[in-house]
Structures are given as structure tokens and as C-alpha cells.
Image (cartoon, rainbow, N blue to C red):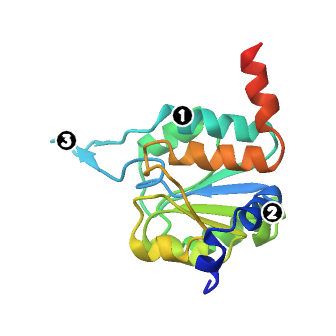
Amino acid sequence: MANANANAGNREWIWARAQKLKLLILDVDGVLTDGKLFFDQLGNEYKSFHAQDGHGIKLLRQTGVEVAVISGRKSNSVALRMQSLGIGHVYQGQEDKLAALAELLADLQLDPEQAAHVGDDVLDLPVMCRVGLAIAVSDANPAVREHAHWVTGRCGGQGAVREVCDLILQAQGYFDEMLHSYLK
């Protein structure tokens, strides 16, 4: 992905890629959350998800764009949140994220160019380097931002996923219609 930086500022190039998307793949820790991990004395794990991200995902799914999660960690709170959002493609505990990507693309019968991935750390680079639109959250590791086609203005867990959803909705011509439905 040596040309990522060359395209990072080219809105038309990013827009053209976003128009083709049929799948949005998200990392969890650092993308859907702020990356902090909370544990109580019994070992229960707690995560915080941004409500705007969830609504953006729901709006995007209404247009037929699939949403999936590929995470290196495994957490019951992630399973519960994804279930509440209607996301059925949840790959947790994935040390080899490329294997999950290959399975996901095969199951959905999609080409890599039809997928976008949002990441924040170097574990996300193998997937980011193989999809049509690689996106980093603004507080991502510098190497991830360097290899992304586009970097969000918001941090992970702070509405960055909503920003991505809105970009795709705008590029595919759905945003204005959806916004208008709320203004009636």
C-alpha cells in the first residue's frame, strides 16, 4: 500500500472507492471503543461503545452494506453489542485476521475492493493492505495512519465509526434521503 499517502488527500479517489463498498469491516478495541480495557476484581471485562457509531451502523446496514467485526480479542460485551446492532459477521479472538477476511469475503461472495476496513493498530495492517478502502481512526498508531487511504477526524470510540458510515452513505447517495426522513 505504498500509494496510500498519495491518495489520502484525494477526496474524489476516496469517494470513488466508497461508492463501490458492500462491506465495512471494523476492529473493536481502539475503533469501536477508545481502546481502554476495564476489568473488575472478578475478571469481568467492560467496554464503552459510542451510541452515534451504533446508529451509523444501523443506517448503513439499511442500505444493504454489510458490517462485520474482526477482533484479535474475545469479549462477551462485544458479542452482546454486535447482537444488539444486528451484526452477524463477528470474528473474535482472531490472531490471523487475514484468515477471517478470506472467510468473510468468500461467505459474502465479494471482492476485496468491495470492502473497507477501519483499524487503529499494526495488527490491522494485513487486512487494511488488502481491501479497497483502508481507514484509520485519528488516534491510530502512526504506522497505521501512514498506510491508510483515509484518516477519520474523530478518535476511536468517540464517533469515528459514525464518520465512516456517513462517508459511505454520502458517497453512495443515501445520506441526504436519510437525513430528510428525520426532518419530516
**Contact? badges 1 and 2 (CB < 8 Å):** no
Specify whether 13 is left or right of 100: right
Position of residue 141 relative to residue 46, above or below, is: below
Specify whether 39 is left or right of 78: left
The residue lying at 59 percent from left, 46 percent from top is: 163
Disc 3 from disc 1: Cα separation: 30 Å
The disc placed on residue 16 is: 2
The residue lying at 57 percent from left, 32 percent from top is: 84
First in sequence, mark 1 or 2: give its number. 2
Of residues 126 and 13, the one nearer the viewer is: 13
Disc 1 from disc 2: Cα separation: 25 Å
First in sequence, mark 3 or 1: give its number. 3
Question: Circle 1: is it few (<14), some (14-19), or many (20+) Cα within 10 Å?
Answer: some
Position of residue 34 relative to residue 107, above or below, is: above
Q: Name the amino acid, label 2.
A: Ala
Q: Position of residue 159 (x, y in %)?
A: 49, 42
Question: Circle 3: is it few (<14), some (14-19), or many (20+) Cα within 10 Å?
Answer: few
- Residue 88 showing in the rendered view: no
Q: Secondary structure at mark 3?
A: loop
Q: Name the amino acid, label 1.
A: Gln
Of residues 58 and 15, the one nearer the viewer is: 15
Q: Name the amino acid, label 3.
A: Leu
| Residue identified by numbered label 3 | 42
| Disc nearest the viewer among 1 and 2 | 2
Q: Residue furthest bottom?
A: 2
